[in-house]
Amino acid sequence: HTRCSSVSWGSEMCIRDSYKGAFFKMQILFNEQSRTFHLTNDKISYIMTVLPNGHLSQVYFGKKVHDKADFSYLIQSCARPTTSYISEEFHNIISLSHIRQEYPVYGTSDYRQPAIEICQTNGSKISDFHYQSHSISKGKPKLENLPATYTENDDEALTLTIHLQDPVTLVEIDLLYTIFAQNGIIARSAKIYNQGKDDVHLTTAMSLCLDLPDCDYEWLQFSGTWSRERHLKVRKLEQGITAINSTRGHSSHEHNPFIILKRPTTDENKGEAIGFSLIYSGNFLAQAEVDTHDVTRVLMGINPTTFDWKLEPNTSFQTPEAVMIYTDDGLNNLSQSFHKLFQKRLARGYWRDKARPILINNWEATYFDFNEDKLVTIASKAKECGVELFVLDDGWFGKRTSDYAGLGDWYPNTDRLPNGIKGLAERIENLGMKFGLWIEPEMTNMDSDLYRNHPDWILHVPGRHSSECRHQYVLDYSRKEVVDYIYNLLAKILREAKISYIKWDMNRSITECYSVAYPADRQGEIFHRHILGVYDLYERLTSEFPHILFESCASGGARFDPGLLYYAPQGWASDDSDAIERLKIQYGTSFAYPISSIGSHVSVTPNHQVYRLTPLHTRANVAYFGTFGYELDLNKLTPAEQEEVKEQIKFMKEYREIFQFGTFYRLSSPFENNVTAWMVVSEDKETAIVGWYRVLNGINLPYSRIYLQGLNPDFCYQQSIDGKSYFGDELMNIGLVIDDPSAGQPYGDMATSCDFDSKVYVLKAINK
Ligand code: DGJ
């Protein structure tokens, strides 16, 4: 046995966690002899090394290990039959096929999918990147024009930049790795520079590549369709490619730019998992390729299928950021790390840390059929019940009396709003409420002044049919003049009227993605340039109007992604407002996204999407675990129901900080059980709230218990329904006993349970 030596150079920082008062330590170590990098904090180690021939190789990502001078025994490069090799230097034959790499290319002995592909003027796509230098800096640099995680002070993170070069094209890459002080987080991106004399085309430029040494993982993805977003799908990794993507121009209803690899034995509360999230709202690819030696390559970034970026000499391209988080404490812990990062260091601005206003939205109450008085009537009743914000949805502008017309004409329709938005906003403010407004700034209808005046401002191919969806076209946001035009119209309204909230919608995927403003050899850039235009408009409006609360939306949840969380701290999770459907949607969403970001409302029964009848208390019990609001006309409820709504609002006002900013735990999955359960716990663990939901009722049922999480075992908690007290360890180890009238024989009025029943339990520490 040789002794481990630990000679390392690099940066080391200690920070005090402002929430818990504990010390966290992070380091980026570099060993000059072995040219090994080690990024580490109290949770993780991320190790890579420069091979003798200059390639950058992945060594380890996982639970923290001691630093050592040399980890080269982990570079497994045995000679294998029929292997092509790039180098015979030193005693080993280096075949890139069998080496785990940080940013691999195709065509120089690695046959797996690459992280980068560069097409050159001679038609060659071959490149070969070698380590040149590196630097370590405190904090985290901003990514130009792209959303990304950030630090508030330099002590929160360290960033390693590794500089690579291809000696033939003279293309250079900066690989950025940020390790945060807390949790197992590594943020990554790549910046690619053309330092050569010729143009090149980037046809693949991923944000992240991670080669893992085995394939003993289950792959979790969050997929669906309109009104059925982010349903959990699980499958085992096998040799070959497992992938999800979007080619629609937005992150999509169909797949979310978030995946998890977990060990088969990992569950919510124990075991290893790695989550991967792309901070991007456009076309993405997330894939895991298992080779025939069971090595797993994870790639995440802009979808290469719809991407081709012309990189002229002396220009650069910045990829979006990808975040990876490792845990060995189960999926709840993984989600909590994502929640905290996204809530505190991705979302920004005035509303980031604030409990969200309880709102009422008129969409399901009126659709396009309203006038000013009708809206004020809805708002007045809502105010009487305690609602704080009235949101005017679609239909207030141009000739927008149906979804056939008006998009792009962002001035009030004075037939229905004679006093304009300014006048309506004043009336709402005079009621003592805040006023919010819906917009869909990336779109236009054929029947609109915008389209009549600028038919070439839509994404379209001249001479070809332009496909419609919901009777609308997508504006070409790769053109600055288009973004400027929309910005001017919207900024005028926001300057004139007292508007406190914006719901930013986007109701169709892109087709015929072509911009008449760009030459043929730049058409592969349009999808990405379009989304950069969307980010530009978001940046301009959010910085000019910092007190406005922005909620993103895309036919419900088609763009519920981390890219938009940077601008809008909450998003409408789905157009499906049925409480039972929402169990799966909100449960799936919670794997990556914090409760403060999940827009969820109480709507009418029969529900407008699935025509289901659910009790009013269940609709609220689901919506509490989100930003909370109403999507109906409260005037149409019975007096008893209106009283119930008043109680719901009072309850939410009392506990919303805990719902939205507490630590969230999933307890029972709607994807596996008839019962869904989840809970939130306050930072000090003195208050916890448990949601219990049963889809179908039964008779003479077994007794049921829910095993709680995250409580202080020594605190004694008073439970809100039976008024009795229980120790934290009792509730976690023995379980919360559900007082269920269906466990037994129903007698007349004693049968109080029904299909779609639910309960919310509040637990308050009474002796600490
Ligand atoms: C789709 C959104 O998801 C709905 O909430 C609503 O705003 C409609 N668009 C309005 O057209």
Image: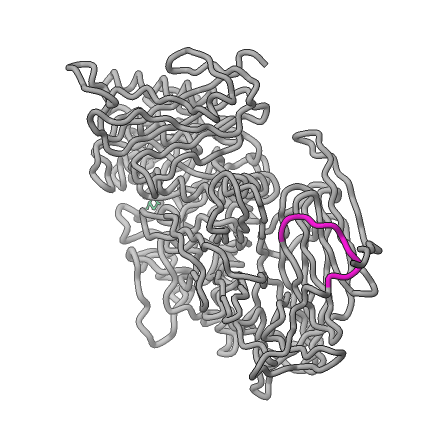
Q: Is residue 544 visible?
A: no
Type of secondary structure dominating the magenta stretch: loop
Q: Residue at x 80, y 51 (%)?
A: 11
Q: Residue furthest front?
A: 1
Magenta stretch: residue 580 in it? Answer: no
Q: Judge left or right: residue 699 versus residue 652.
A: left
Residue 555 picture location, percent across and down: 35, 49
The N terminus appears in which quarter of the rendering? bottom right
Location of ligand 1 given as a quarter of the image: top left
Q: Nearer the viewer, residue 216 or 341?
A: 216
Q: Residue at x 71, y 82 (%)?
A: 88
The C terminus appears in which quarter of the rendering? top right
Residue 440 picture location, percent across and down: 40, 49
Total number of numbered discs in the rendering? 0
Q: Residue at x 54, y 40 (%)?
A: 333
- Note whether 322 is above or below 396 in the view shown: below
Residue 160 picture location, percent across and down: 73, 57
Q: Judge left or right: residue 67 versus residue 184.
A: right
Q: Residue at x 55, y 66 (%)?
A: 295
- Note whether 509 is above or below 316 in the view shown: above
Residue 714 picture location, percent across and down: 57, 19
Q: Residue furthest left?
A: 748
Q: Nearer the viewer, residue 167 or 291?
A: 291
Q: Nearer the viewer, residue 134 or 556?
A: 134
Please, which colouring scheme is shown? one colour
Q: Nearer the viewer, residue 510 or 330?
A: 330
Q: Judge left or right: residue 557 versus residue 561.
A: left
| Residue interval drawn in magenta | 62-71
Q: Is residue 624 visible?
A: yes
